[in-house]
Image (spheres, rainbow, N blue to C red):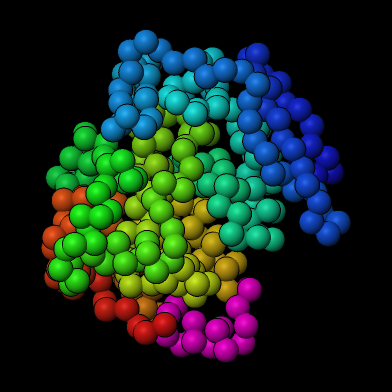
């Protein structure tokens, strides 16, 4: 029944949300999410380093959008307005896909956006209550190869955050440009918070000293889940270990889970760290400042 719902067209406010499907075993799961309506932006825009242009909407002057309503116009570039029912359907399909294949980052992203509104409001509030977090929200920095000089980071001393981040990207053959733009968050400010979280994820890995293997990802998800409360992170932390082999599970339970729980509960709020201003700071000094217990060896 749920899968049949996921395959139908949903039409609202002249917008058609199309959910394609593909087969994995006997289960159909969504693979393509798009809208047939061109994105139309207000003439007055805020620019986030030239990548995401957010529209100035008079109805959003109080930086709050009614989550129950669907805006008739996109609020920012890539935004797809959706109802709560549509978000529920999207989240079910995304959750099923992500559970079967945790490396489907597009579905993980959709799950985070369609279930994260309450948590994003809390993250935004906590950032507003912190001086460094406030600056991040005011300046709205982006983390990508247009805004960060990766080559310059490679020339920093090896003990710095900047060099460690460069090495993480190189060793794991990843780039910050692969982070998907936010689409389903119906609030301009909260959309940026989600984008910031998404683009900071590799920096969380770097600061926490965790690789991108399954144990490393689950450990980071525990820290993120405890700090942000995002359902996507919490579900990843809980269900990720189901894919562990027996040896991995033993190491995880004995070492990495207790460490991740301590760090998540006791360290400074990572979303309030303006990493781009700390490239030259020694990594271990930053860990001490944030109260991050040194990571166990993977």
Residue at 15% across, 68% down: 157
Residue 105 in percent (x, y) is at 55, 52
In this picture, which residue range is highlighted in magenta?
242-257
Q: Is residue 236 above or below residue 142?
A: below
Residue 174 in percent (x, y) is at 43, 58
Q: Which quadrant holds residue 291?
A: bottom left
Q: In the depicted view, which residue is nearer to us: 237 or 125?
A: 237
Residue at 34% across, 45% down: 144
The answer to whether residue 91 is magenta is no
Residue at 80% across, 44% down: 3
Dominant secondary structure, magenta: helix
Residue at 50% across, 60% down: 234
> Residue placed farthest to the top in the image?
43
Judge from the rendering whether residue 232 lies leftward or rightward of residue 49; answer left or right.
right
Residue 241 in percent (x, y) is at 58, 74
Question: In which quadrant of the rendered image does the C terminus lie?
Answer: bottom left
């Amino acid at each position: 029944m749920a899968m049949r719902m996921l395959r139908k067209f949903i039409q609202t406010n002249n917008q058609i949300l199309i959910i394609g499907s593909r087969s994995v075993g006997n289960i159909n799961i969504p693979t393509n999410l798009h809208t047939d309506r061109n994105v139309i932006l207000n003439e007055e825009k805020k620019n986030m380093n030239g990548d995401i242009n957010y529209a100035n909407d008079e109805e959003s002057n109080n930086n709050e959008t009614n989550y129950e309503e669907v805006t008739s116009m996109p609020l920012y570039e890539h935004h797809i307005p959706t109802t709560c029912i549509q978000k529920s359907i999207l989240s079910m399909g995304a959750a099923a896909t992500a559970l079967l294949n945790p490396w489907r980052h597009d579905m993980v992203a959709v799950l985070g956006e369609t279930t994260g509104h309450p948590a994003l409001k809390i993250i935004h509030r906590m950032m507003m209550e912190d001086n460094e977090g406030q600056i991040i929200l005011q300046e709205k920095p982006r983390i990508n190869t247009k805004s960060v000089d990766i080559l310059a980071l490679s020339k920093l001393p090896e003990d710095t955050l900047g060099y460690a981040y460069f090495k993480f990207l190189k060793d794991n053959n990843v780039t910050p440009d692969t982070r998907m733009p936010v689409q389903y968050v119906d609030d301009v400010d909260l959309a940026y918070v989600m984008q910031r979280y998404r683009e900071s994820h590799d920096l969380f890995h770097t600061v926490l000293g965790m690789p991108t293997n399954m144990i490393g990802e689950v450990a980071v998800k525990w820290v993120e889940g405890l700090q942000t409360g995002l359902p996507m992170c919490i579900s990843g932390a809980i269900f990720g270990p189901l894919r562990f082999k027996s040896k991995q599970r033993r190491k995880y339970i004995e070492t990495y889970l207790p460490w991740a729980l301590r760090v998540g509960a006791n360290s400074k709020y990572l979303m309030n760290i303006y990493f781009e201003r700390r490239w030259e700071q020694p990594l271990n000094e930053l860990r001490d400042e944030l109260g991050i217990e040194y990571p166990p060896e993977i």
